[in-house]
Amino acid sequence: MIKVHVDGQTKEIQEGATLKEIIPDIPEKYSVAIIKSSKSSEYKTKNIRFFTSSGEVVIELNTRGIKLFSDDYFRKLFDKKGKSSASDVLSVKWSDRQATTFGPFKSAIVPDRKQHRYNKGDVILGCGGYDPENSYLIFSRMPHVADHGADKSGGVIGSVVSGKNSVHTWKPGDIVKNAERIVSTENTSDSFATTDRSLQLEDGMEIITHVTISAYGYDKDKISIDASNSVEHMLITLKGGEFQADLNSSGFVRDEKMKKSTVPQEIKKSRLEGTVTVRTSGRLEGSLYIYTKDIPGSPNHTVVGEIKHGIELVKLIRKGDAISVKTIPGQIDLRGLSLKESLKILNKNGIKPSIDDNSGERVVIDQKPPNTMEVLEEKKVSLKTVPLSNVIGIRLNDTDAPRTCGIFREVTGLRWYNIGKMPLLFKYDDVTLFQPKVPRKITINIENTPRDTVPANMLAMTNDSRRGVGLVGVRTSSNNEFGPTSEPFSATNIIGEVIETDKLSSLKEGETVYIREI
């Protein structure tokens, strides 16, 4: 018998056992981390983090700064818990458009009594009245020339690399609540990520099968909704329990499946190892990032969570790999679910429902509050439903029409929720036409057009070659001349099929039609 460790749990297995035998429930498309041996050592980085009453700031220290914040000196300023040892230590004493000062405290500097030039973001050790007994940390807000009572070097001990916005919000009365030297772990292990389930296991191996992400603001005893919209975007991205590494950089991995989505900037913090963010602007807006190294904060990213388990797996995956992901909490999005199933989920989470109609079989089409964190915080939710007979099942063909299917999901709402909708334009003979609102900026290129005959019940979207671009249609009989939108084959992009065609007969022109993927 040999011992292996799976997600922190020790298991005894027969010698010669394979990876598949101990993780049969993990889909084989997902990479898992294999760590054969591990030698970890902690070392102090050249960064120090200040937790102030107006936000976090990370300072990258230069050689002089590292010497200043030696362990002995650090202990004099802060107690063992990192908190200020006196109420008047490191509080804002004065602030103007050029700089903000924190102090006073004792230092051993010898004032130069001359002006020096400083850059925006510089952190300076100076003193008041040329008295080292009244020394200060001075944060430069803008390029300027001044005499801050520094030594002949100018007194620059580092620069702000994260939390720059906080520097501009500090005012008298703000304090440094606590501080810490940032410690990193160096791992020299024989490790790799693999999808090969035939891998033979060895004694002492560690296997990491998944990643667990805790959403920003979530605590089982108290919920914060400060990031509820961007956290919901993360939960949508990971709805299938999968993170796809579309890019693997030296400091992060990125999942682009929800790029080009509008996401608000809600939480700007340091992007430390294990931090999860969403990009809020630019070409990749909506993409999800997991950081494998400390990176300064950015106004183009909003923090949505942090890794609680599996950072080793994130560090080992390659571009194109997919991994299994669990979120805390799980998403509470009831749209598209049956009312019966929805009530079970709400009961499990201790949430009180308010229902517009609970007669017969019904499907949830909307919920208020709309986001998971808000539902958990309020402990109640209002549900809007429709009869099951009003919801039509469809199947989309991503293999042959990936771009058009993507457009269809976006304009109907299926990209974000498990139910979509579109208005019924009109019906005649065997044709039913729908008119979802397609933004002008979206181009529907020719894709997966039919050749000889269009079978019955195919779902299609008119491409840019005709004036009726964006129309969606279904024809309940086959046709060898026109497509489901009554356009020539060259203008018809086949995107899938309607499964529940029996429901089409009851539809009325002008009404909203609800659809679900089956």
Image (cartoon, grey):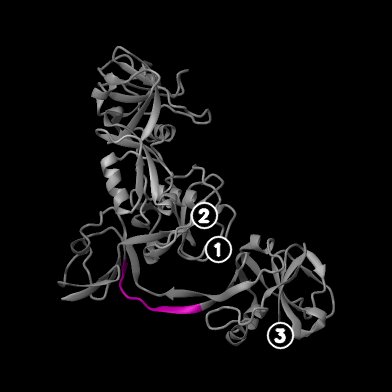
Residue 148: % across, % down = 79, 75
Residue 375 visible? The answer is yes
- CA gap, disc 3 to disc 2? 40 Å
In the rendered image, residue 268, in percent from the top left (x then y), is placed at: 56, 58
> Which residue type carries mark 3?
Ser
Secondary structure under tag 3 reads loop
Residue at 28% across, 22% down: 504
Q: Residue at the location (62% across, 65% down)?
A: 161
Q: Is residue 75 magenta?
A: no
> Which residue is label 2 attached to?
226
Amino acid type at image mark 2: Asp
Amino acid residing under circle 1: Ser
Q: Earlier in the sequence, mark 1 or mark 2?
A: 2
Query: Which mark's residue is nearer the viewer, 3 or 2?
Result: 2
Residue at x-position 41% and y-position 60%: 214
The numbered mark, 3 or 1, whose residue comes first in the sequence reads 3
Local crowd at mark 3 within 10 Å, few (<14), some, or many (≥20)? Answer: some
In terms of secondary structure, what is the magenta stretch mainly?
strand
Image quarter of residue 342: top left
Classify residue 340 by image quadrant. top left
Q: In the rendering, which numbered label is found on residue 107?
A: 3
Q: Which mark is residue 115?
A: none
Q: Which residues are magenta?
A: 34-43
**In this rendering, position of residue 405 left or right of residue 231:** left
Callout 2: helix, strand or loop? Answer: loop
Question: Is tag 3's residue or tag 2's residue first in the polypeptide sequence?
Answer: 3
